[in-house]
């Protein structure tokens, strides 16, 4: 966990727990042996930024546009609802979520939450 200072935002604790559980479990399930997951929390004057990054295989470019669609999965036995639910929860709190490659060429999910609702 990388968080230089505490950040407080107004969100539903149970729903944010679900967001984090989904993102972390997704990362763990795809990681190679000795894989790592890094959670970072930063802020600016208007937003809290949370990222969940790993050193797994990442997501091929052709699949990145489908990550948040219901029933899309790249994992054998996966249902494909986790990221769709995560996106729905994040957006219900006025936030955004996006995908990028992590610094280790794995997956990184980037969340931004406003301090004040519009």
Image: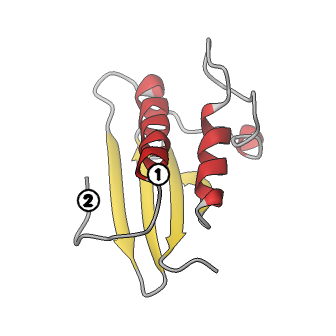
Residue at image location 35% in from the left, 64% down from the top: 41
Residue drawn at (59%, 55%), measured in percent from left and top? Answer: 90
Q: Secondary structure at mark 2?
A: loop
Position of residue 9 measured from the top left corner of the image (x, y, whole percent): 41, 69
Q: Quadrant of residue 64?
A: top right
Residue 55, numbered circle: none
**Number of marks present in the image shown:** 2
Q: Horizontal and vertical percent for residue 67? A: 69, 41
The residue to which callout 1 is attached is 102
- Left or right: 110, with 14 as reference point: right
Find the distance from the CA under tag 1 to the CA under tag 2: 14 Å
- Judging by the rendered image, the residue that carries numbered circle 2 is 2
Mark 1 packing: few (<14 Cα in 10 Å), some, or many (20+)? some
Q: Position of residue 15 (x, y in %)?
A: 49, 46
- Label 1's element? loop
Disc 2 packing (10 Å; few <14; some 14–19; many ≥20): few
Q: Is residue 15 left or right of residue 69?
A: left
51 up-or-down from 59: above or below = below
Residue sitting at the far bottom = 45
Relative horizontal placement of residue 50, taking residue 63 as reference (left or right): left
Residue at position x 47%, y 40% in the image: 18
* Residue at horizontal 74 percent and vertical 29 percent from the top: 72
């Amino acid at each position: 966990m990388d968080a230089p200072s505490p950040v407080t935002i107004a969100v539903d604790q149970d729903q944010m727990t679900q967001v984090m559980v989904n993102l972390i479990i997704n990362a763990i399930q795809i990681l190679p042996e000795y894989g790592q997951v890094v959670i970072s929390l930063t802020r600016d004057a208007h937003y809290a930024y949370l990222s969940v990054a790993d050193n797994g295989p990442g997501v091929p470019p052709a699949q990145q546009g489908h990550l948040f669609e219901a029933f899309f999965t790249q994992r054998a036995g996966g249902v494909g609802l986790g990221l769709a639910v995560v996106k729905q929860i994040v957006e219900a709190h006025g936030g955004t979520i996006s995908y990028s490659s992590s610094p280790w060429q794995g997956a990184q999910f980037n969340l931004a939450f406003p301090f004040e609702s519009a």
